[in-house]
Image: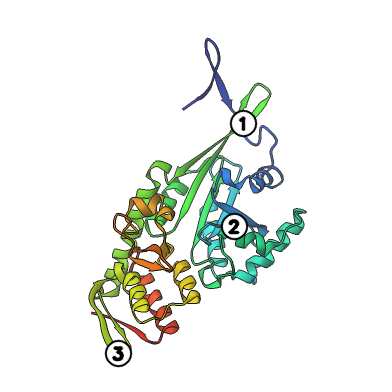
Amino acid sequence: MAIYELANDTLIKVETTSFEAEKLRERQDIQRLLRANIQAISPDTLVIAEEYGHFVESNRRIDLLGIDKSANLVVIELKRDDDGGHMELQAIRYAAMVANLTWEHAIHAYKEFLSRTEQDLDAESVLLDFLGWDTPQEDDFGKESRIVLAARNFSKEITTSVLWLNDMGLDIRCVRLNPLRLDERLLLNVEQIIPLPEAMDYQIEVRHKKREERAARNDGKDRSRLNLYVNGTLYQQGFRKSDIGLYTVQALQTHQLIDDTVFNYLRHNKTCSFQLLKQLHEITGTADKYRKYRSEREPEFFYQDVGYYVARNWDINNTNRFIIEIQQRFPELRFEWD
């Protein structure tokens, strides 16, 4: 579809151009501009490194490395050509290489980035403020990785591969960068083409459901029900994994095991990819649309006279991670699959 300027009595077509024709270089121009304006292709993202290459026995470098508001790592790859080359495979390699990036590694990388870009800021303070954390939460950092591919265009091979990889549980976004010229002005049309923005929430929900179904099939047994014991006594029997957060919090509260430290731990726990405890006004977007919290009811948990709702986004994998973590932290509690 063409883009037009609305004039008084006519439409003036905005002509398509190319980065090559405009003599814009990939790293020195496009990457530099997007580095400083990353929201254009990846909203709610903070760039913490450029040309990141701290990999053992590898000379590969990530164009831009960021984190999002959920403390996920964001690998951003850029191309100025018309087919994207093999950037999806390249980005997957990079995502695998940074999968074990720790909080301390991120701080070190961000310090280097701030120094190189001549920004007089404290790396850790900026990261904490961006994530909304009072103190570092190493266990919640970098649990998942996302990939953003930005290019002049994408070949059918890339789009087909990305659609399949997303269906298998990865989170890859393709953003088309289309330079345009209107008289002496150079414009940039930025379009997210995969997943389509209007279908993104739905596709994410479908992907999560398929991932859970595959995990259940691969596990070889029905793990849909749980029992919870406190000090060896049955507290709750035969509940669904979607209620594991609720009964855990209630059991801890009933047995007076929650103080300020424990509450802060529970409040910010994101094992299920959503914050475990939220107030009503904090539940927005996808979480509300797909009932990740029982926000239509009265609050399920109160602490210091403030009501909270408990996240319900549990699949087999994150349920098992949560069980291990809770049993290690609270030896009074024990779970078993029914």
Q: Position of residue 6 (x, y in %)?
A: 53, 18
Residue type marked 1: Leu
- Residue to which mark 3 is pinned: 232
Q: Earlier in the sequence, mark 3 or mark 2?
A: 2
The residue that appears at 48% across and 67% down in the rendered structure is 268
Distance from Cα at disc 1 to Cα at disc 2: 30 Å
Quick one: SS at disc 3? Answer: loop
Question: Mark 1, residues whose alpha carbon is within 10 Å: few (<14), some, or many (≥20)?
Answer: some
Q: Is residue 173 visible?
A: yes
- Residue to which mark 2 is pinned: 130
Q: Position of residue 229 (x, y in %)?
A: 29, 84
Residue type marked 3: Gly
Q: Earlier in the sequence, mark 3 or mark 1?
A: 1
Q: Earlier in the sequence, mark 1 or mark 2?
A: 2
Q: Is residue 200 above or below residue 191?
A: below
- Residue to which mark 1 is pinned: 187
Distance from Cα at disc 3 to Cα at disc 2: 42 Å
Are the residues tagged 3 and 1 within 8 Å (C-beta)? no
